[in-house]
Amino acid sequence: SVGSQPVTINQVGSMVSIFFTGGPVTDFASAAASDTGAFEDFFWHMLSRGVYLAPSQYEAGFISTAHSEDDLRRTCEAAREWFEGKD
């Protein structure tokens, strides 16, 4: 968990998915048990900071060479801001 918000990040290569749950996400049932309200709040926060995520926790995001170090830094800062507000 980050702060008081449990989170699981699944990653394969450059694909990532974030789930707001304290346990592993290995199938649809464990994904569906995640806090979709927290994902929605996180999605809109990130969008308001100029970070465009897939609009569903069931979709993967992709990191590529098109993303600069500054893009990644700004993404991490925006995410940190949201998680720090959850303490």
Image: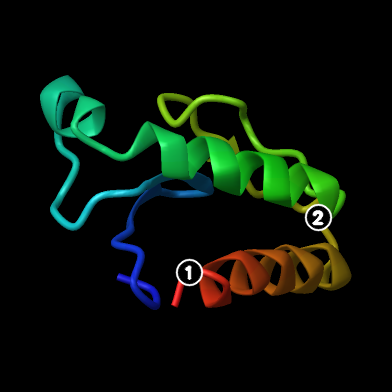
Q: Is 45 above or below relative to 72?
A: above
**How many residues crowd around disc 2 within 10 Å: few (fewer than 14), some, or many (20 or more)?**
few
Q: Is residue 64 among what the camera can see?
A: no
Q: Secondary structure at mark 1?
A: loop
Residue 36 lies in quadrant: top left
65 displayed left or right of 32: right
Q: Earlier in the sequence, mark 2 or mark 1?
A: 2
Task: Determine which residue is flagged by label 2.
Answer: 67
Of residues 44 and 62, the one nearer the viewer is: 44
Of residues 71 and 36, the one nearer the viewer is: 36
Q: Secondary structure at mark 2?
A: loop
Q: Amino acid at mark 1?
A: Lys
Task: Determine which residue is flagged by label 1.
Answer: 86
- Percent coordinates x, y for residue 13 in the rendering: 45, 49
Q: Is 18 above or below relative to 75?
A: above
Q: Residue at x 51, y 25 (%)?
A: 56
Q: Residue at x 48, y 40 (%)?
A: 39
16 displayed left or right of 52: left
- Percent coordinates x, y for residue 71 in the rendering: 83, 62
